[in-house]
Image (cartoon, rainbow, N blue to C red):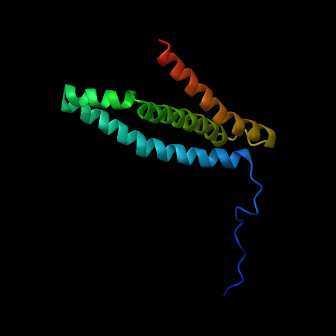
């Protein structure tokens, strides 16, 4: 067996908010791709299927389980968007200072939650 250096493992690294935001970015992107695509295709199929199909879609998406799915999708969208904006700033070479990186790593999911709450407040209170 070759005597090669070992890659750092999760047990070696000290966990920080930047690691959580990176994982959340991947998970929310996958959720949007899988669940969001499923809901989008179902909605398109319901519209193409006629009034009865669309009424079934609206009824199920208006149920408590459907609302959880829709709120979860909007949370995933806003969290992914805020993390993407954070990554965009990092890509242009800014925000690598430890305090700044930690601050924006904490603010990204918090802003995602606040934007989700504002989005649903605007929809439900209209």
Which of 85/76 is in front? 76
Image quadrant assignment for residue 58: top left
Picture mark count: 0
Q: Residue 112 placed where, x, y %?
A: 60, 32
For the N terminus, the image quarter is bottom right
Q: Residue 30 placed where, x, y %?
A: 48, 47
Most distant residue in the right direction: 99
Residue depicted at 55% across the width and 48% down the height: 26
Residue depicted at 64% across the width and 37% down the height: 86
85 displayed left or right of 15: left
Up-down relation of residue 12 to residue 123 (above or below): below
Q: Residue 83 placed where, x, y %?
A: 61, 38
Q: Looking at the image, can residue 94 be seen?
A: no
Image quadrant assignment for residue 113: top right
Residue depicted at 19% across the width and 32% down the height: 49
Q: Residue 50 placed where, x, y %?
A: 19, 28
Most distant residue in the left direction: 50
Image quadrant assignment for residue 105: top right
Most distant residue in the front direction: 64
Most distant residue in the bottom direction: 1
Which of 42/8 is in front? 42
Residue depicted at 35% across the width and 32% down the height: 60
124 displayed left or right of 59: right
Which of 6/88 is in front? 6
36 displayed left or right of 82: left
Q: Looking at the image, can residue 7 be seen?
A: yes
Which of 125/19 is in front? 125
Up-down relation of residue 126 to residue 73 (above or below): above
């Amino acid at each position: 067996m070759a005597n090669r250096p070992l890659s750092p493992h999760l047990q070696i690294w000290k966990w920080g908010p930047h690691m959580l935001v990176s994982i959340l970015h991947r998970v929310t992107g996958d959720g949007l791709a899988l669940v969001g695509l499923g809901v989008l295709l179902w909605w398109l199929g319901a519209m193409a299927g006629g009034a009865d199909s669309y009424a079934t879609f609206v009824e199920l998406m208006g149920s408590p389980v459907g609302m959880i799915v829709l709120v979860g999708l909007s949370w995933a969208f806003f969290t992914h968007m805020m993390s993407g904006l954070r990554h965009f700033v990092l890509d242009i070479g800014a925000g690598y200072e430890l305090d700044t990186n930690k601050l924006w790593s904490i603010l990204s999911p918090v802003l995602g939650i606040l934007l989700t709450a504002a989005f649903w407040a605007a929809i439900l209170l209209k």
